[in-house]
Amino acid sequence: MPLDTGRATHLQLVADDRDDAPDVALLSIEHGADIGEALQVAREFRGLTLQDVADATRIRLSYVEALEAMRLDDLPSRPFTIGYVKSYARLLGLDGEAAVARFKLDAPEDNEPLRAPVGVRRESDPRLGLLLAGGLLVVVAIVLWNVAQRAIATEAPPPLAAATAPRAPTIASGGAVALGAPVPAPAESTVPEPYKTPGLDDAAANGGSADAVTAASKARAVEAAANGPVIDAAQTAALGSPFKSKAAVLGASPADGSGVILQARKGASLVVRGADGSVFFARQLAPGEAYRAPRTGGLTADVSDPSAFNVYVGGVLTGRLQSAQTSLGKLGG
């Protein structure tokens, strides 16, 4: 690392002017009993004081003294000490890496944990304790609130009102018993009408074979497609009600429409094809969306669920689709 020598005002290597100075080549980190003694010899040869070294390397004076004396307990953690050795050696013109290698030989690593530099004081943040206390209070409040809500919800239900006991007959004077009004009979439970498979009656009339059932079902579908939507009793109350837009109205504009509108009661697919089989419209309609048929002859509507579409002709409800494939021209009359 670069050395800041701005504060060293008298770091002059005066050894070259001394008549009795030893040969510079003799200076080596291998001299002495350890790396500390080698650095001390090189420093004295350069004519530098301990304070000069501390000022040039920005290392504490006490650390420089401890390093030359190899008092490792007075030095900071090993990584810091290695950096001090390298800086000290480079200041004296020695090989910093060789000095570090000599230091590791003289003071083998014993895997001691890192120690903070001397003078560093750890201070705990008082706000951390306040945050922990506040968080604990919030958690306790939430737990208590949930316990209270659960206790309220699990309270015993109010006692059922006692059934009114039948009044005992009153005995009039003379021994005659006055009876009250007769109690109505309990309501009988009703059983729903059993489900009948469409075409079952026709199949039974034709012998009950599977082919007869299939033929009867196809005949009903063809008749429904030819006669348009069949109105059942459940739809009678809504017949004649005006069309109300509940969502997007797709297809032709009111001016170009044929007067036939199919509105989805629930989600279902609708595909409108021309007489040649070309697709005019195809979409999965959401509940409330509607399709206004254009003034084009030969259009056919294919739907996934006929009961999911209400049919409006001339702006009023006429019923529901009765088959998966219906001619739109026949719906409009």
Image (spheres, rainbow, N blue to C red):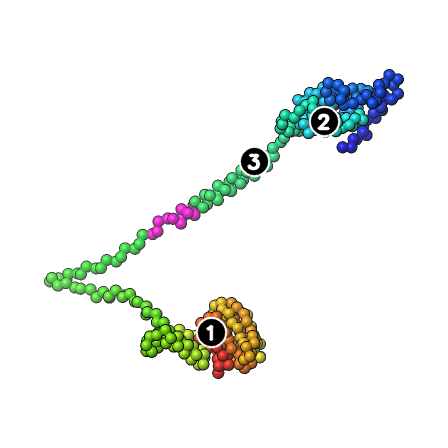
Q: Amino acid at mark 2?
A: Ala
Q: Is residue 157 magenta?
A: yes
Write down the region rendered in magenta: 148-158
Q: Nearer the viewer, residue 229 or 274?
A: 274
Identified at 35% across, 49% down, the residue is 156
Could you give the CA–CA distance between mark 3 and mark 2, rounded to whole angstroms?
Answer: 47 Å
Q: On the image, which quarter does residue 21 sit in?
A: top right
Tell me residue 221's x, y (percent): 43, 77
Q: On the image, which quarter does residue 175 sit in?
A: bottom left
Q: Is residue 289 magenta?
A: no
Tell which circle, 3 or 2, labels the residue nearer the N-terminal end. 2
Q: Amino acid at mark 1?
A: Ala
Report the residue marked by disc 2.
Answer: 101
Q: On the image, which quarter does residue 253 sit in?
A: bottom right
Residue 246 appears in view: no
Please identify the residue farthest to the top as the structure is shown: 20
